[in-house]
């Protein structure tokens, strides 16, 4: 299927997910572009890629050639308007705010890539498709953190998404070594609904004093084979991201997705998890 996955790939947004996507596409041999306007964030992406590839080489998961492609072969641009026209695939992975998505998707669409994807974890693909010129070539491509380790990509088909675009989306996922599932454009798709229920319940358990975050996570890891536990994962994803998704899904799917007060309070005081050094865990030593 690699013939369906051709051309350069651009990732718009240098956050945690964007960094991971740059890693997997560059390591798979794609000419990869990162679009990130903030110079400090650009530096942070470079640092994270250096550390991640060193670990990948040490574990035998990455060759020296792949490491060079990831750390030295990625072009960085400041805005989507600087991208070459007619790229094979452009994926936006900017914050889950409709106005931000609209601005970025419109800018991407003006560069006429063959395919445009959104890494949204909860927003409607049909709603976002209004911001692109060719909605038949637009779909969701939801990755999971850490992108270089977790093998799943959730592909979301909007009402207008064409069969050819869907075939190409699956081919790109396969080309970077991922397994894909295809879901319809429903609130929270499949994985976000499942993941968020577990995360919100774990947060409520902390709020109710049931157990410490460490013991709640340990129970999920040991008893249910969760990779790291829902609270540690929430810290890595970002508690502000969790809160945005919870608010959005509670509006569409009901109060079972409503964010606990403790989550709102933590975000309000800036305890967002790994990226700020403190969430349910202390990340200052890992920074």
Image: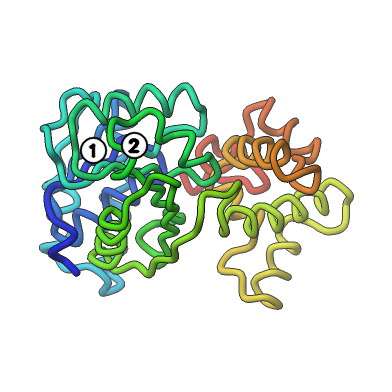
Residue found 31% across the figure and 57% down from its top: 163
Q: Position of residue 123 (x, y in %)?
A: 53, 39
The residue shown at (29%, 65%) is 56
The residue drawn where x is 62% and y is 35% is 244
Residue located at (75% from left, 30% from top) = 265
128 vs 135, left or right, is right
Q: Estimate the x, y position of residue 214 in percent, counting from the top left.
A: 71, 60
Question: How many residues crowd around disc 1 within 10 Å: few (fewer than 14), some, or many (20 or more)?
Answer: many
Establish if 40 lies above or below 121.
Answer: above
The residue where tag 1 is placed is: 34
Q: What is the secondary structure assignment of the residue under circle 1?
A: strand
Viewport quadrant of the N terminus: bottom left
Q: Is residue 190 left or right of residue 35?
A: right
Nearer the observer, 222 or 145: 145
Q: Of callouts 2 and 1, which one flags the residue occurring earlier in the amino acid sequence? A: 2
Q: In terms of image quadrants, where is residue 270? A: top right
The foreground one among 247 and 162 is: 162
Q: Which residue is mark 2?
A: 14
User: How far is mark 2 from mark 1, CA to CA?
Assistant: 7 Å
Given residues 160 and 89, the one toward you in this image is 160
Element on which disc 2 rests = loop
Q: Position of residue 232 (x, y in %)?
A: 61, 54
Snapshot colouring: rainbow
- Residue 41 drawn above or below residue 236: above
Quadrant position of residue 107: top left
Residues at discs 2 and 1 in contact (Cβ within 8 Å): yes
Is residue 54 visible in the rendered image? The answer is no
């Amino acid at each position: 299927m690699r013939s369906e996955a051709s051309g350069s790939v651009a990732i718009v947004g240098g956050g945690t997910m964007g960094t991971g996507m740059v890693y997997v596409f560059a390591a798979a041999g794609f000419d990869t572009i990162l679009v990130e306007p903030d110079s400090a964030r650009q530096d942070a992406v470079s640092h994270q890629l250096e550390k991640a590839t060193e670990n990948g080489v040490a574990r035998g998961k990455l060759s020296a050639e792949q490491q060079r492609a990831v750390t030295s072969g990625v072009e960085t641009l400041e805005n989507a308007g600087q991208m070459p026209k007619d790229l094979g695939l452009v994926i936006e992975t900017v914050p889950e705010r409709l106005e931000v998505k609209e601005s970025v998707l419109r800018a991407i669409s003006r560069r006429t890539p063959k395919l445009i994807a959104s890494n949204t974890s909860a927003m409607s693909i049909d709603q976002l498709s209004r911001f692109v010129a060719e909605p038949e070539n637009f779909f969701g491509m939801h990755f999971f953190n850490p992108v270089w380790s977790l093998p799943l990509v959730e592909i979301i088909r909007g009402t207008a998404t064409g069969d050819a675009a869907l075939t190409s989306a699956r081919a790109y996922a396969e080309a970077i070594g991922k397994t894909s599932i295809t879901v319809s454009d429903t609130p929270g798709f499949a994985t976000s609904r499942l993941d968020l229920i577990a995360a919100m319940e774990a947060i409520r358990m902390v709020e109710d004093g049931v157990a410490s975050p460490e013991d709640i996570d340990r129970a999920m890891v040991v008893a249910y084979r969760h990779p790291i536990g829902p609270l540690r994962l929430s810290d890595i994803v970002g508690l502000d991201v969790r809160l945005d998704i919870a608010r959005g899904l509670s509006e569409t799917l009901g109060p079972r997705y409503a964010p606990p007060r403790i989550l709102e309070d933590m975000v309000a005081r800036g305890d967002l998890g790994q990226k700020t050094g403190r969430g349910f865990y202390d990340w200052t030593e890992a920074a």
